[in-house]
């Protein structure tokens, strides 16, 4: 079997032009999140298989790249199930490893703890535009803050970052898991069926209102329950303040503080934001992860047509490791999709250092070569970026390639000069 030049399906090589933009975006992210008090941490890319399969990651648990046991632990003959062969896997997101990290190190961390984590994750998913099998995630999370100050800070930090990258007129869609449950209870769905209802509701943007209605009915739910449920969405669309209307309509099923908490987040973010965006209450927003316990939110950028990040509150997750629940809330920016949009827009890094190419004729060596390198060193010391390369036979084509890489100035050195 011959060697293969192309990367594995769903993974990609990153060329210099994109890498420069990725590095720039990461710097903006780190700089902005640091201004909000977030500190960088790192977790291993390999995680215990029991943590990855703890029924907290939704459909992502079906997409794990599992790692086989090694050495004496691997007994192929005695293995009866897949679990007998694997004891670890590549992380499918950054939240599960982060919660394990916090649970293991909480006595050494401040409270509240504001974490920033950037790293690769892996999912055996079907590749498509903006979706890969290996991709970078960028998460900020706050542990130990029970109030909605956590949500407000997370949304402001994330949207400030997007604003610095030039994004405008996007939306932060926001909802509450307890509102989802209250709507289902009001409509008469049995409690054990809530998650099934939410999974169908989550398809609203793909199959539409009628598609959701049909799927609910086909799933065996009573027609009167389905009509009552979907009627809430229809009535909300007619209201100026859908959240206030809903809170009054299903008041006996929803604690007033849940409505007030969400309303305060929307108002506080809207009043103090620095980027150009809208916070929109979206009662159809579900988020697939089963670990969410309260507020949930997503980034919607019109140019992409799908979610470009999201997060929410997950107050019960730390307790699965420690036995004691800890308030926790996080927001993941859609790093790969942001990069894709910037690349498609022809994004240029602002106020980039001047890029100068020193082209040296092949016969230059010894003392003359040292003079050229010394000049390059002095130019670098003044803050410019200098590439020192040998001159090709086809100098015109060489310059054209360098121009594509952002070089704007050329200096040529010849042995007889």
Image (cartoon, rainbow, N blue to C red):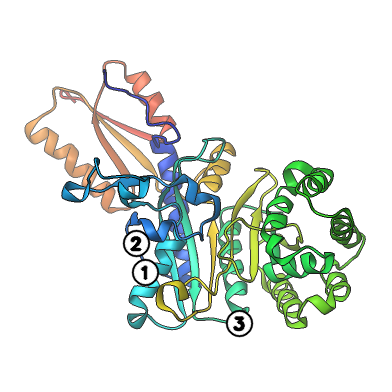
Counting labels gives 3
Q: Which residue is drawn at 25% across and 41% down?
A: 76
- Quick one: SS at disc 3? loop
Q: In which quarter of the image is the N terminus?
A: top left
Residue under pointer 2? 43
Tag 2 and tag 1, C-beta contact below 8 Å: yes
Image coords of residue 281 (percent x, y): 76, 64
Image coords of residue 237 (percent x, y): 88, 58
Q: What label sits on residue 147 in the rendered view?
A: 3
Q: Residue at x 51, y 50 (%)?
A: 60
- Quick one: SS at disc 2? loop
**Sequence-wise first label, 3 or 1:** 1
Residue under pointer 1? 101
Instruction: Pick the residue in front: 379 or 267.
Output: 267
Q: Quadrant of the C terminus?
A: top left
Q: Which residue is drawn at 10% across and 29% down?
A: 365
């Amino acid at each position: 079997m011959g060697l293969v030049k192309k990367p594995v399906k769903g993974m990609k090589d990153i060329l210099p032009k994109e890498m420069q933009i990725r590095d720039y975006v990461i710097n903006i992210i780190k700089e902005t999140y640091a201004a909000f008090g977030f500190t960088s941490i790192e977790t291993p890319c390999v995680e215990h298989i029991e943590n990855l399969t703890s029924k907290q990651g939704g459909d992502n648990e079906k997409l794990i790249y599992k790692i086989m046991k090694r050495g004496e632990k691997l007994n192929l003959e005695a293995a009866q199930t897949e679990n007998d062969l694997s004891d670890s896997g590549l992380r499918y997101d950054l939240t599960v490893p982060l919660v394990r990290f916090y649970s293991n190190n909480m006595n050494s961390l401040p409270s509240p703890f504001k974490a920033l984590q950037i790293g690769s994750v892996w999912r055996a998913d079907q590749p498509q535009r903006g979706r890969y099998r290996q991709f970078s995630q960028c998460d900020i999370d706050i542990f130990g803050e029970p109030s909605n100050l956590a949500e407000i800070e997370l949304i402001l930090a994330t949207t400030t970052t997007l604003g610095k990258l030039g994004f405008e007129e996007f939306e932060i869609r926001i909802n509450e898991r307890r509102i989802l449950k209250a709507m289902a209870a009001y409509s008469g769905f049995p409690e054990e069926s809530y998650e099934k209802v939410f999974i169908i509701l989550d398809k609203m943007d793909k199959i539409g209102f009628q598609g959701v209605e049909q799927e609910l009915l086909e799933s065996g739910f009573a027609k009167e329950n389905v009509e009552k449920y979907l009627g809430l969405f229809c009535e909300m669309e007619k209201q100026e303040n859908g959240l206030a209307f809903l809170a009054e309509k299903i008041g006996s099923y929803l604690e007033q503080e849940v409505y007030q908490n969400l309303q305060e987040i929307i108002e506080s973010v809207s009043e103090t934001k620095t980027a150009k965006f809208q916070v929109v209450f979206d009662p159809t927003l579900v988020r697939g992860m089963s670990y969410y316990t309260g507020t949930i939110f997503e980034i919607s950028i019109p140019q992409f047509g799908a979610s470009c990040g999201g997060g929410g509150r997950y107050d019960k997750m730390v307790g699965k490791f420690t036995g004691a629940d800890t308030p926790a809330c996080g927001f993941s920016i859609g790093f790969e999709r942001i990069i894709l949009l910037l690349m498609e827009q022809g994004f240029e890094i602002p106020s980039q250092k001047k890029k100068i190419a020193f082209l040296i004729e092949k016969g230059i060596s010894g003392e003359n070569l040292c003079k050229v390198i010394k000049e390059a060193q002095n130019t670098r010391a003044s803050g410019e970026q200098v590439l020192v390369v040998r001159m090709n036979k086809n100098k015109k084509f060489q310059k054209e390639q360098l121009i594509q890489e952002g070089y704007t100035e050329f200096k040529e050195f010849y042995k007889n000069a």
